[in-house]
Amino acid sequence: MSDPPLLVLASLAEGAKHGYAIMEDIQRFANIRLGPGTLYGAITRLEERGWIRSVESQDRRRPYRLTAAGRHHLEEQLAGLDRVVRTGQQRLKHA
Amino acid sequence: MTRVFRLAARLYPRVWRERYGTEFEALLEDAGLGWRDLPDVLRGALEMQIQTWDFRKLVAVCTLAGAITAAGVSLRMPDRYVSTSVIAIQPTAEAPDLQWLLQQALSAPALEKLIRNEDLYPADRRRRSWEEVIAQMRQDIRVVLNRSNGQPTAFSVQYSYGDPVQAQRAASALTAQLLDANLAAAIERHTPGLTLRVLDPADLPGRPASPNRLLIMIAGTAGGFLMAALATLAMRPPSRSTSES
C-alpha cells in the first residue's frame, strides 16, 4: 500500500501534524519513507480537494488536520481496503 | 546538501512557493535528506509546474517532447536498404512449382552459404545461433508474385539489409540460387523446368527504404499531443467538497 495521499490522511486521522511529523509517522506505521516532493505533492492535492486544512501557526512548520470530507473519504477508502484484505485472507484459507 | 535542496525548491512554481515554500524548506532542513531524495524533490517540482500550465503550454511542451523523442528514436534506428530483382516466369508442363524452388533457394544450408560468402550479419553471428541468423535473413527476404489471369507471370525477390552494396550482392546471389535450383531440378527430373528470365537484375538502392523518419516524427508529435490531452483530463481537479468539520 503506497498511495501517498491515503497515507497522509491516515497519519492525520490521529491529529494535526506538520510535514516532518507526517513523514516520520508514515515511516513508523507503514514502513514507507515518503520523499519531500511526494509528501508535499500529496498535501497540495489533499488541500485542493478540501480533505485537509492547515492549522494557524506561528511556526514555519505549518500543521495540517483532516476535514470532515477528508475523514469521510478516508473511511470509504479504508472500508474498501478492508474488504480486499478480508476477501484475500478468506480465499487464502480455502486455497 | 541543504543548499542544493533549497535551489531545487526554487524550481517549484512561484504561486506554490508562496503558499508552501516556507514549510517545505523547514521540512528539507528537518528531514536530513541525502542525494537519493533529490530526484523526488525535482519530480515534485515538475509535477507542480505542469499543474500550473494552461492547456496551450501543456500541448506545446508535450508535442515538442514527443517530436524530440521520436527524432531521437528514429535517428537511433539503422537505415535499411532494399534491393530488388524481377524474374519473369513461364511455367511449363511437369515443371517444379515456384514454391518448391523457393524452398530450395531459401533452405538453411543455402542461406548459411550465402551469409558466409557475403559476410552478412557479422554482429548477429557473434551473439546468436546460426538458426536465429538464418531466421533473421528469411525475415529480410520478400518474394512478391505477379499474376495475370490467375497465372504467375513474374516475381520479385527483395532483400533488406543495412548496407546498400551488400543488399544488392545478396539479392543477386538469391536470384542466382533460384535459377540454379530450377536448373538442378530440370536436370534431376529430366524435364524442361520453369522458364525463368531475369527482367531486372538486383538494383543498388540509392536511399534507405526504412525507417520512415518523417512518419515516426509525425507519430511522436501526435503522441505528445494526445498525452497533453490525457494529462489535462487527468489533472482536472474534482469538484471541491464544501463540508467542513
Image (spheres, helix red, strand yellow):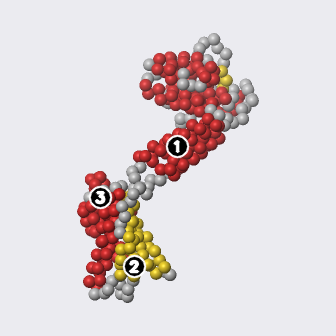
Do the CB atoms of the residues marked 3 and 2 lie less than 8 Å apart?
A: no
Dot 3 falls on which chain?
A: B
- The answer to which image quadrant residue B133 occupies is bottom left
Q: Residue at left 71%, top 28%?
A: A68
Q: Nearer the viewer, mark 3 or mark 2?
A: 2
Residue found at the far top of this picture: A58
Query: In the rendered image, is residue B46 in sight?
Result: yes
Do the CB atoms of the residues marked 1 and 2 lie less than 8 Å apart?
A: no
On screen, residue B197 above or below A13:
below
Horizontal and vertical percent for residue B47? 57, 32
Q: Along the polypeptide, which appears first: circle 1 or circle 2?
A: 1
Q: Residue at left 43%, top 23%?
A: B34
Dot 2 falls on which chain?
A: B
The amino acid on which the numbered mark 2 sits, given as a three-letter code, is Ile
In the rendered image, the quadrant that contains the C terminus of chain B is top right
Mark carried by residue B89: 2
The answer as to whether the residues below labels 1 and 2 share one chain is yes
Give the residue pinned by disc 3. Answer: B120
The amino acid on which the numbered mark 3 sits, given as a three-letter code, is Leu
Mark carried by residue B122: none
Query: In the rendered image, is residue A14 in sight?
Result: no
Mark carried by residue B67: 1
Horizontal and vertical percent for residue A70? 67, 30
Horizontal and vertical percent for residue A74? 64, 33
Q: Callout 2 environment at 10 Å: few (<14), some (14 to 19), or many (20+)?
A: many
Element carrying mark 2: strand
On screen, residue B112 above or below B179:
above
